[in-house]
Structures are given as C-alpha cells and as structure tokens.
Image: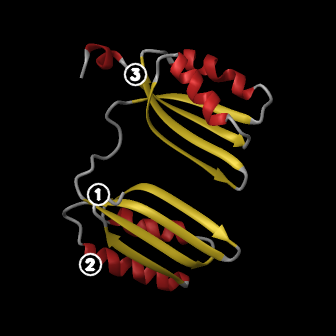
Amino acid sequence: MSDAAASDHLYAVTVVGHDRPGIIAETTARLAELGLNLEDSTMTLLRGHFAMTLICAGAAGGRDIEDALAPLTIDRSLRVTVAEVPAESGPTPGGSPWVLTVHGGDRTGIVSAVVAEVAAVRGNITDLTTRLAGDLYLLVAEIDVPAEADVTALEAAVERVASELGVQATLRRVDIDEL
C-alpha cells in the first residue's frame, strides 16, 4: 500500500430516490473531482426508484463529499448519505461460495425464513436480489458458507423451510470464476 493510500479514508455513499437519466454520471463525476477512487458499487432500480451504494476511498473528508453531492438533492427527488466506514469491516471470507435461489408464489416471510437458515450456520450473504413478477417471487443470494458448516444439513434446512412456504429452493456451490 502506498503512503497516499495509507492516509485514505473509506466512505459509503448512498443515493436513493426517483430515477432519472444521469444520476450515476453526475454522482461519480463529483466524486472523481474530489480525487475519490470508486472501489465497490451496486445500483438497481426498485419499482422505479433508484438505489445506489458506492464505496470510495480518498483523502477528501465526509463533509466535502456531502457538499459536492448536495446539488443532487436540490429538487428533493434524491437523498444522499455519506458515512465513513472502517477499512476492515464485515466478516472475512474463508468458506466457499454458494448460490441460493428461491422461487414460487409470493408470500410474506420468504426472505427472513430462508436467510435465517444461512445465518444459523454462520453463512454470510454477500449479495441478495429479489424480484416480484405478478405472483411469482424470485430470490437469488450469493453466500459464503464457512468451511466448518455442514452443507448437507443447510441444504436440508433450506428445503424444509421452502416446502413449508410453498416455494422451491436450490443451493449450489459455484466456482469463484462464475461470480
């Protein structure tokens, strides 16, 4: 790590609100003007609402970032938050990557019931997407399953919960190249 990188701070920047063209371009341009490096990001549309989280690093302060992004919020269609995050945050991957898919008729509690089984073996969900198309509900989660976890028992628990909910679930190991 260079001396400059050692003094960098990490920030989580979220932008949420009504979608319109140019949000990503405007946000990232303002961050680049501050010398911030975009290290990780995710963006999606949720029923016509824009949602983006960026992790960026640089010497700029949180207040400088808030000031630079303030024009995005002038018309009140977007909300921006900035928070400093520790350089070493979250669980350290050490297990194996798996993909969990769940699909079936929509009903309350699908996500909480299925992910509780992952949490019970100390699995870490690294990405989760859900979609509702009519009455069909789809959940796709990338998870890191710890080496000491009993995957056979996890698969059985997920299948049991899915059956109780009237949905179908599959858990499959993936090569890191697939992710």
Callout 3: SS: strand
Mark 3 residue type:
His
Callout 1: SS: loop
- Read off the residue under disc 1: 176
Q: Relative to 30, does residue 135 appear above or below in the rendering?
A: below
- Read off the residue under disc 3: 9
Instruction: Kindly report the distance in space between the C-alpha atoms of the residues bearing marks 2 and 3.
Output: 41 Å
Q: Dividing the image into 4 quarters, which one contains the N terminus?
A: top left
Label located before the other in sequence (1 or 2):
2
Mark 2 residue type:
Thr
Q: What numbered label is drawn on residue 91?
A: none
Instruction: Report if the CB atoms under discs 2 and 3 are less than 8 Å apart.
Output: no
Label located before the other in sequence (3 or 1):
3
Q: Residue shown at 73%/52% (left/top)?
A: 48
Classify residue 168 as left or right of residue 123: right
- Read off the residue under disc 2: 152
> In front here: 11 or 19?
19
Residue 142 picture quarter: bottom left
Image coordinates of residue 137 in percent, x first then y, are 60, 73
Q: Relative to 151, does residue 51 appear above or below in the rendering?
A: above
Q: Relative to 115, does residue 156 appear above or below in the rendering?
A: below
> In front here: 127 or 28?
28
Label located before the other in sequence (2 or 3):
3
Callout 2: SS: helix
Q: Dividing the image into 4 quarters, which one contains the C terminus?
A: bottom left
Image coordinates of residue 170 in percent, x first then y, are 41, 77
